[in-house]
Amino acid sequence: MTPTQILRRLQQNERLPERSRQRLRLRECGLQGLVACLPEGTVSPQLCQGLYKLFLGADCLNLSDLLAVVQLSLQADLSVRLDICRQLFHLIYGQPDVVRLLARQAGWQDVLTRLYVLEAATAGSPPPSSPESPTSPKPAPPKPPTESPAEPSDVFLPSEAPCPDPDGFYHALSPFCTPFDLGLERSSVGSGNTAGGGGSSGTLTPASQPGTPSPLDGPRPFPAAPGRHSSSLSNVLEDGSLPEPTISGDDTSNTSNPQQTSEEELCNLLTNVLFSVTWRGVEGSDEAAWRERGQVFSVLTQLGASATLVRPPDCIKRSLLEMMLESALTDIKEAPVGVLASLTQQALWLLRLLQDFLCAEGHGNQELWSEKLFEGVCSLLDRLGAWPHLANGTADLREMAQIGLRLVLGYILLEDPQLHAQAYVRLHMLLQTAVPARREEACYVLSKLEAALGRVLNTSSLESATDEAGSPLAAAAAAAAAERCSWLVPLVRTLLDRAYEPLGLQWGLPSLPPTNGSPTFFEDFQAFCATPEWRHFIDKQVQPTMSQFEMDTYAKSHDLMSGFWNACYDMLMSSGQRRQWERAQSRRAFQELVLEPAQRRARLEGLRYTAVLKQQATQHSMALLHWGALWRQLASPCGAWALRDTPIPRWKLSSAETYSRMRLKLVPNHHFDPHLEASALRDNLGEVPLTPTEEASLPLAVTKEAKVSTPPELLQEDQLGEDELAELETPMEAAELDEQREKLVLSAECQLVTVVAVVPGLLEVTTQNVYFYDGSTERVETEEGIGYDFRRPLAQLREVHLRRFNLRRSALELFFIDQANYFLNFPCKVGTTPVSSPSQTPRPQPGPIPPHTQVRNQVYSWLLRLRPPSQGYLSSRSPQEMLRASGLTQKWVQREISNFEYLMQLNTIAGRTYNDLSQYPVFPWVLQDYVSPTLDLSNPAVFRDLSKPIGVVNPKHAQLVREKYESFEDPAGTIDKFHYGTHYSNAAGVMHYLIRVEPFTSLHVQLQSGRFDCSDRQFHSVAAAWQARLESPADVKELIPEFFYFPDFLENQNGFDLGCLQLTNEKVGDVVLPPWASSPEDFIQQHRQALESEYVSAHLHEWIDLIFGYKQRGPAAEEALNVFYYCTYEGAVDLDHVTDERERKALEGIISNFGQTPCQLLKEPHPTRLSAEEAAHRLARLDTNSPSIFQHLDELKAFFAEVVSDGVPLVLALVPHRQPHSFITQGSPDLLVTVSASGLLGTHSWLPYDRNISNYFSFSKDPTMGSHKTQRLLSGPWVPGSGVSGQALAVAPDGKLLFSGGHWDGSLRVTALPRGKLLSQLSCHLDVVTCLALDTCGIYLISGSRDTTCMVWRLLHQGGLSVGLAPKPVQVLYGHGAAVSCVAISTELDMAVSGSEDGTVIIHTVRRGQFVAALRPLGATFPGPIFHLALGSEGQIVVQSSAWERPGAQVTYSLHLYSVNGKLRASLPLAEQPTALTVTEDFVLLGTAQCALHILQLNTLLPAAPPLPMKVAIRSVAVTKERSHVLVGLEDGKLIVVVAGQPSEVRMGRGWGGPSNGAGRGAAIPADPTQPLRPPGAQQPVRAEAVAVLAAHLPGVLGRDGIQPY
């Protein structure tokens, strides 16, 4: 006997006292409490049947209990739910009053409609009507920030004030449709390849609260429906599948109709039940009644998106609408005259729903355009007499007629011959009566017919071409097209006849074939449709009028239905909450007696068990950490135990930065977690409800305690105190700075703040180094080793910035010359070690300065007093003064730096850092066009309005935001007014964009309580992200810098399971790019070009005013609608006022996730930037330097100088780019270093530009090269037969040292410049050193050898100058199987790249020497040596490889471009043999043995300019630091200097240069600007008139010091 049977018998037992029987009847909690507390699991038929009998056996029917039983059956199998449907059907049709009572129950739409679900509900899921349920019909209410920080809402509101919903401004349209798009109306309804994708696809409305299905969600794909049919009461009764009402449901089966499946029977029964309750139970015909009915359709849409139904939801909706049409027509026929008005209103609302349904879900799904719907609409409108009111009449009848016309045209576009034939007849009748009365209706109909006719004519022409091949299918298709044409042409003819004057055909179509009496009109009109006159008339006259008509009619209806569906969702949410409250009350009453004690005990045991498992896992992972590092080193492809099958590499973002502060590099993620559990938890969202933690409510309790009432204008700037500034003026004594002895200066407890963790530790500063010791209990593996310890030379410290951490002035950020940076927070006490006397130890500041700020300032003071020689601007003042002292604003205004560089520098000065996600660098949205196939940066319309905050970039939101600000008032007086409750830059926003890249993936999962966020809320599409900003003023996220340089974050390279979109069921993988971007790299490149465009340059200062400038705070911010929640501003919260440690830490965590406003750098309007033309005129007026050749590639000119007179090749010619100049020697010439193949060293004088010289540069040849007595030769001997190779030479950036390889003894030698004295020779390689390379910052040198190894050497510095190499290498890199042929190194990106003679390129890290990746350039069957390697400023790897198809065949050469992460970006076959390669800015310069200099685009390897022909083969290529000259060394010893012409020529348009006026300086003969440069002896190398003028004005100058025009 089941429990329900026992309970039922006890209720009927008369021996029990009446009081006990009343308690057994569950009067207080009802069946809801019992059902809510039933154990989860499969629900049996006996349980449901027993509960249903308990419901029937009650004294009075409680329909709330009935819904509880139905809700329980949702967890049961299909047979159980079918039995419940049978019971419901007989109850409703046996007791007609039940439908009215049932319609008054809260949430009946949701509960009943869920019976359509094919599979049982997941065990453990919350009640379907719960507001937190993922199937809730309306966006869930805002959660506390700790639960959903990815979408923070207006938090910290006092409990007395209601919390406004930041996403409450959603635009919930029809549950049938995508957002209103008139463009879709012009395409075929039957087309399957439409933009909307049919009723089962679309885009999620960004304003919808993620975590719940969107109101626009479509259903999942279903198998094809078995033909077009409808459900009605007569269908069900005629099937005979239902037993008589007198038969018990327990014994009912489906044996009476074996052809009908259980799913079909369930669908038919439930459809009739829903129809009865919806149409008969809901009373009234006003909008409120239709809102009740509309909730059924809304729930169907949600279910279609989240579950599989017994029949596609579209078919169910169609059946309901068919039945409603049939009943509406019957009611009108049988109704007396007095109620006809209300029935007319009822019919109008029904037609509105039908229009929404067919024009949205019917788009692309012809199955929904049923014949019954067509007949029902036509019959209803005929009965009401609405057709004559199409042009004039009452509003209701006119609207019904317009809807009918739209649907008739929709049926015409169908492929079904029967349906569109009926539609043709109906439309022809309408054309004869009412439609062409006005120009607007005529243009609308003509546009639709023309679109269909054009498609048919195109199909006919295509099929005719195919038919020539004799295809039967083509013949059939052509016949079908001809048939449709035979219908359409008469319709168009009738329309043109009827609307001749309204359409203006007399002047619009003068060549129109006569429509009256012409026997050939059919053929003539088809031919006329292809004429330009017809197309022009349609495009210029008909289409605009049609579009305006649609906007005036159907757009209004769309807006009305949008509000209607919003109201439906509101009511559905309200009723769901009310039902949930009732359920909770009943459950609580039942729980208090039985379940609560047991559940409490089970919870405690579960927590204890979880803690034990976590502890064991931590211990196990620590035990494996060290062994894993050792194993990877041995088993890597270059290790001793290299594996045959290497595992799939997984990647994470490195902390390495370029000099432009770009974090581009990915490194192997040895502890990769695919987060499968997080994906599973996301897909089962709601299975384990998240209970609000205590920390979630903490801000409400402690906000008032932490609030600071100091006005912003009284906030002191973050800077050192006067005493500290005075001490900085006292220089440290020589004994203190003794470089031979390292002495401890200061030690302080601190925290190293990184992206993934805040690491406690100890900072020590000595006279030579900065140390940090990791003090965490559990160490992890980092890029620099196990743990976060580091040691950095103080001489490499470049900048120190004052920083905030959690709104406290307690942090510093250290920047070193190799771009390494460390963010240190000082929450603890400081302990200083006196250097010479206690009086020199910085003293704590008295007064109101907080202790942590004092500690921070003391550390800062010591770093400044030590005064590292490589400091940039180590400002001891505030960020505002630092910006003024840097001169960055003036450089940007004058276009000396790019927009990206300026924004990055502003972020850095304002306290934005990569190390703290709550203070991540912020960049603007610059574009608003993410839908066009091409991006036209010359069109201002594609750009975002940078003068407005992102929250009001949509003008419609401005008034809403302003009203919210003005109406806000905190009763407690704690919260200041604000426009936005979220912030444009916070931790959750950064993780939102970088979710595909570790470690941000793990941080996102951690932030979301161990699960991935809802797929629709993730960053899955650039266009959707921008649309979210337009549709919701609550979404105010700006961009991050990665959008302008890092394409890898747009790809899901690690293969995370990010789920599927609810609307389209499309799997979320790589970010969907705009149509104008062909790849992530292309998107980044074009996006960066947009940032640097003229429009952005002219308006960027407006955005800077909002984020960093005077509009950030105060009245200007209020006027600009730019005020954010007060906790984001510095000085608004003082955490030290919170006395409770636990509460303070909780508030710190919330602020960390909420975001922080940058420091205010400017308090006056930011100056505007000069236009490109203005900047060019300014440079022309100043005339201070030579122009960059890469900006004037069409103005190139060449000179040559005889550097080596005996014809020995010139293998090296370069100007070191960081030559030191004192204040006195500013403007003096630089050193130009040349080396010949015989080892002849030349140190020449080089001046790139002097305004007193009429030519382009000044070059003075080294006088020591003219005599054999004074010549300086590099020490040899060299490897026999090869001489000196340019790849085995390197010059220090400061020009003080020359490093050489290629010596017979395998040594690496160091030569002093300019003297040419040998300083040292290091013999660590086992064979000849074949290649050398230096990093750009002058810290490391890498050497490659024939012994297949590479070595990384540290340069020694003294007084800021290079003095030699360390005696032993820092790293020895292994892995090559042949001699190393070329190397390159980038210290800032921590990468060493080497190529070998077997065609392999290997990437290692510099600091740890670990293997990263191996590249094998594509080529022929047999790879040859890698001859050249070069690294770009952003880590691009340019490889020049060789190969041959077979042994002995001709060698082929190729150029390959790889990204910093080893991804092949481009390849270029070379027809010439390369001999020299260099990379600068965005260009590759390639010299060849065939005497040509090629300039290629770095990102594409495409030619940037025509090849520059030289006379002889090229041996070396170098670019000067100003990018104004290219130095080319030739095989015959000449030095070619390529320039862009004199500045006055380039900027002002002069044709050629003037005469020389200085000894040792040459003159230029420019090449014809319309012809490429030619070597001497070629046809027309220079202009004849230029030669004549040159000969007349330059007597005795040509040839002096070897300078000649080339």
Image (cartoon, rainbow, N blue to C red):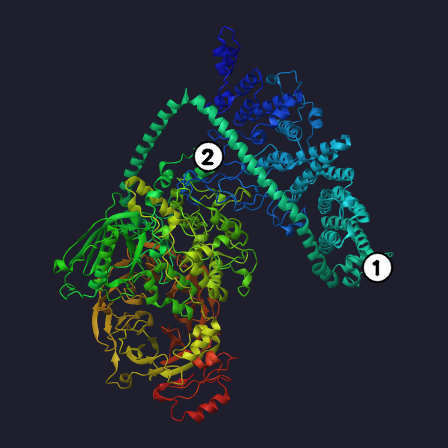
Residue 824 percent location from the top left of the image: 28, 53
**In which quarter of the view is residue 940 placed?**
bottom right
Residue 658 visible in the displayed image: yes
Q: What amino acid does circle 2 point to?
A: Gly
As helix, strand or loop, the secondary structure at mark 2 comes to loop
Residue 841 percent location from the top left of the image: 16, 58
Q: Nearer the viewer, residue 577 or 147?
A: 577
Residue 175 visible in the displayed image: no
As helix, strand or loop, the secondary structure at mark 1 comes to loop
Q: Quadrant of the C terminus?
A: bottom left
Q: Nearer the viewer, residue 814 or 1261?
A: 814
Q: Is residue 255 left or right of residue 1017?
A: right
Residue 1178 percent location from the top left of the image: 43, 76
Q: Is residue 16 above or below residue 644?
A: above
Q: Dot 1 surroundings within 10 Å: few (below 14), some, or many (20 or more)?
A: some
The mark found on residue 514 in the picture is 1
Q: Is residue 890 above or below residue 1199?
A: above
Q: How many marks?
A: 2
Query: Which of the two labelled residues, at mark 2 and mark 1, occupies the earlier sequence position?
Result: 1
According to the picture, the residue beneath numbered tag 2 turns out to be 686
The mark found on residue 1258 in the picture is none
Q: What amino acid does circle 1 point to?
A: Pro
CA gap between label 2 and label 1 equals 69 Å
Residue 107 percent location from the top left of the image: 56, 30
